[in-house]
């Protein structure tokens, strides 16, 4: 009897330890969203505890359950659904779900606050909640003006002084995920612009007469390696003005429109993150998703290196590249052994957006496209060894 009790305690110990660490304070009504990190445990059944990222499509994958939609639910509601699914095959099921990282409800504030940056809402937030998280205003309320940018074109004027004076006032507007609050000092507002996104020093900057885009980018520390230069734009008076920076900055081509574009007070220059990515999955050091830089192409060999190289049991001869053609995925076989040892460059293809470089385990049969995608959903964004 004592031996069985010790075994039971040992089986439950990982789950207990995992939840022993104090989780962040989360409103019980917090609604889960994409990129949130949650921890799931089934204390009555060992081996089912998992820490998972919610995928951009809102789903997670859990043993004995498969794919399940997590977004739009509270942690308690998700636990109930997982419990019901597990009870189809298991007895005496209890499920615990904790929110470890709230990445979905991002909101940002920049300008005349003590701490500009991105914050994560732990429930329904209003303007005053965000200002409190940012340490308050950096100057007197009557010396600032505020704007809320929602989506890509909607701009809402804010009455910050009224909201501070009476938080119950309608001026204390409710916030939504991905909202951006710009707070400017009135005394300098005629000289200020904002540079956001993939630049090294984003924030509010002071401009001078006839300042152009390149000078503004230099003042903001220049674009990062993850900058989607071809999709940059200027937000002016609520209208989005496309400003493709790639030809000039990457290809070295003269672009009179960009070179002569003048920045005006109140402008917002936004440089988005590159959306083109590829994946390396299977028996590699660091399986996951990687960005295709706008400045160069990435070959299969380079992609393998970015993923930490092949694992100990990698079957390089059975490697493949999953690529979508006309909306349908197909597998392109790659003999990476011939590429690495015999320098057969015919296999060193350039990675294209949404490609998946796949390295199977030695001794295993080849995997189908469908099986590969199923496994990718389970491990997407998780830096753990790839299992088959």
Image (spheres, grey):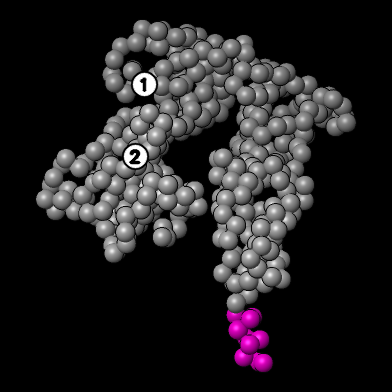
- The relative height of residue 17 versus residue 173 in the rendered view (above or below) is below
| Pointer 1 residue | 246
- The relative height of residue 149 versus residue 98 in the rendered view (above or below) is above
Q: Is residue 333 visible?
A: yes
Left or right of 355 in this view: 374: right
Q: Earlier in the sequence, mark 2 or mark 1?
A: 1
> Which residue sits at x=67%, y=92%?
1
Circle 1 Cα neighbour tier, 10 Å, few/some/many (<14 / 14–19 / ≥20): some
* Residue 160 spot, x, y in % from top left: 77, 25
Front residue of 309/147: it is: 309
Secondary structure state at the residue bearing disc 1: helix
Tell me the CA gap for discs 2 and 1: 31 Å
In the picture as drawn, the residue positioned furthest to the front comes out as: 88
Secondary structure state at the residue bearing disc 2: strand
> Which residue sits at x=66%, y=53%?
99
Image quadrant occupied by the C terminus: bottom left
* Residue 193 spot, x, y in % from top left: 56, 19
Residue depth check, mark 2 versus mark 1: number of the one nearer the observer: 2
* Residue 325 spot, x, y in % from top left: 35, 31
> Which residue sits at x=44%, y=9%?
261
Residue 265, disc:
none
Name the image quarter holding residue 194: top right
| Pointer 2 residue | 330
- The relative height of residue 49 versus residue 307 in the rendered view (above or below) is below
Residue 170: say if magenta: no
**What segment is highlighted magenta in the picture?**
1-10
């Amino acid at each position: 009897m004592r031996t069985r009790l010790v075994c039971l305690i040992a089986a439950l110990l990982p789950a207990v330890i995992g939840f022993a660490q104090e989780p962040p304070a989360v409103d019980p009504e917090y609604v889960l969203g994409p990129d949130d990190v949650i921890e799931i445990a089934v204390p009555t059944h060992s081996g089912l505890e998992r820490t998972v990222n919610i995928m951009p499509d809102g789903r997670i994958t859990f043993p004995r359950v498969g794919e399940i939609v997590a977004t739009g639910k509270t942690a308690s509601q998700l636990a109930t659904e997982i419990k019901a699914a597990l009870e189809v095959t298991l007895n005496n099921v209890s499920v615990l779900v904790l929110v470890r990282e709230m990445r979905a409800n991002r909101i940002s504030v920049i300008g005349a606050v003590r701490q500009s940056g991105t914050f994560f809402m732990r429930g329904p937030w209003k303007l005053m909640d965000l200002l409190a998280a940012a340490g308050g205003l950096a100057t007197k309320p009557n010396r600032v003006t505020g704007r809320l940018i929602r989506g890509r074109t909607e701009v809402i004027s804010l009455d910050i002084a009224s909201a501070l004076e009476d938080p119950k006032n309608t001026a204390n507007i409710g916030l939504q995920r991905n909202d951006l609050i710009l707070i400017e000092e009135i005394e300098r507002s005629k000289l200020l612009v904002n540079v956001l996104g993939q630049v090294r020093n984003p924030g509010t900057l002071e401009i001078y007469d006839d300042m152009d885009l390149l000078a503004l980018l230099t003042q903001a520390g220049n674009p990062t390696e993850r900058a989607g230069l071809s999709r940059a734009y200027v937000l002016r008076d609520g209208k989005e003005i496309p400003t493709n920076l790639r030809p000039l900055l990457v290809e070295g081509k003269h672009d009179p429109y960009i070179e002569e574009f003048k920045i005006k007070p109140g402008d917002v220059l936004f440089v988005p993150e590159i959306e083109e990515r590829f994946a390396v999955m299977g028996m590699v050091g660091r399986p996951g998703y990687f960005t295709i830089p706008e400045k160069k192409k990435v070959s299969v060999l380079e992609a393998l290196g970015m993923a930490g190289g092949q694992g100990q049991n990698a079957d390089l001869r059975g490697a493949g590249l999953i690529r979508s053609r006309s909306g349908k995925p197909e597998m392109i076989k790659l003999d990476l052994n011939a590429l690495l040892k015999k320098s057969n460059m015919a296999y060193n293809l350039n990675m294209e957006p949404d490609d998946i470089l796949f390295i199977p385990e030695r001794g295993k049969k080849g995997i189908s496209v469908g099986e590969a995608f199923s496994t990718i959903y389970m491990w997407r964004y998780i830096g753990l060894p790839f299992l088959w």
